[in-house]
Amino acid sequence: MSFGSVNLTLRPLRFAFLVDPEDRAGILQAIELNTFLWGGAYNPIVPVFRRTPKVWRRDHIERTSAKSVSEGLVQSFDPDYVALVGKYANLTISVGHRRVIRATEILEGFGDNWTPRYGISLFEVLSYFIEKELKFVRRSPIDVRLPAFSGRESLFLASVFGILPSGVRKLFDQRFVPALEAKSAECSLADYAEHLKPATLFPRRLGSCTCSRRQSRASAAATACFLLDATTRLMSSTTGICVRSDGA
């Protein structure tokens, strides 16, 4: 008789959020939903431009249509679902076989059982985290911070640290902040790097704390650092948010 073994790996549902790059409220909504979803840091927020932006000056981008760039991003990230966000209400690009939903559907019925309609929520991840990591008194307390920010750079900082939808945040404050001993911390572009230490946890990292990233040799060799001006038009911030869907 022959025997064998099978290893199963569970991963979060993968979403691609399509947004109008000039829709600040829509971009923020996508960030909020990704903060609430397990593994949301790995979900790309894809800008869908009406025409090729003038800032794309390099030949290999300038000769490519805005539509093909958006379609290429969706193809590269290979999501399970494509979500239409905010003002981008009608699909204008090809997304292949992938199921298309509206971003608002993700939280439909949330008030009934505190779970999203699609995916696994941050609450379920935190319940597991608290049971496993905080069951006993730790020698070294966990540093959990809730960065607070406002002003022109708030969209960029929200993409870095995460931000929960207002209705979800109220329940989060009641159920999880005391157990995590999370502390609010004022944050700005001048000092935000101080909150990015490897041992520091914040909402976006908490949502991926049980995810183990797998990287191929090809992707490891292509690792790069992208620079952006977080105070410029939303177009630049959107590009940065799409790049930051690496879970770092």
Image: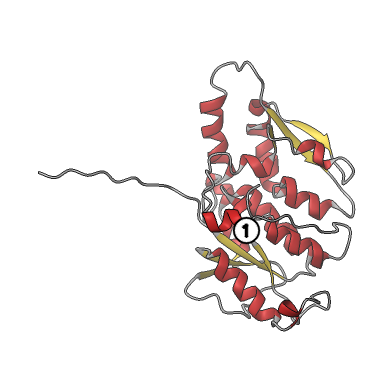
Along the horizontal axis of the image, is 41 left or right of 98? right
Q: Label 1: which residue? A: 222
Name the spot of residue 211 as percent of width and height, x first: 53, 43
Image quadrant occupied by the N terminus: top left
Question: Image check: 151 left or right of 247?
Answer: right
Query: Residue 107: in sight, yes or no?
Result: no
Look at the picture and state if 175 lies above or below 167. Answer: above
Above or below for 67 versus 2: below
Q: In this view, does 225 lie above or below 238?
A: above
In percent of the image, x 52 and y 45: which residue is there? 113
The x and y percentages for residue 60 are 71, 78
Can residue 63 be seen? yes
Assess disc 1: are there few (<14), some (14-19) or many (≥20) residues with their C-alpha within 10 Å of its C-alpha.
few
- With respect to residue 47, does 122 lie above or below? above
Q: Residue at x 60, y 43 (%)?
A: 207
Left or right: where 198 falls relative to 148 = left
- In this view of the protein, which residue sits in the foreground, 65 or 203? 65
Viewer-proximal residue among 109 and 134: 134
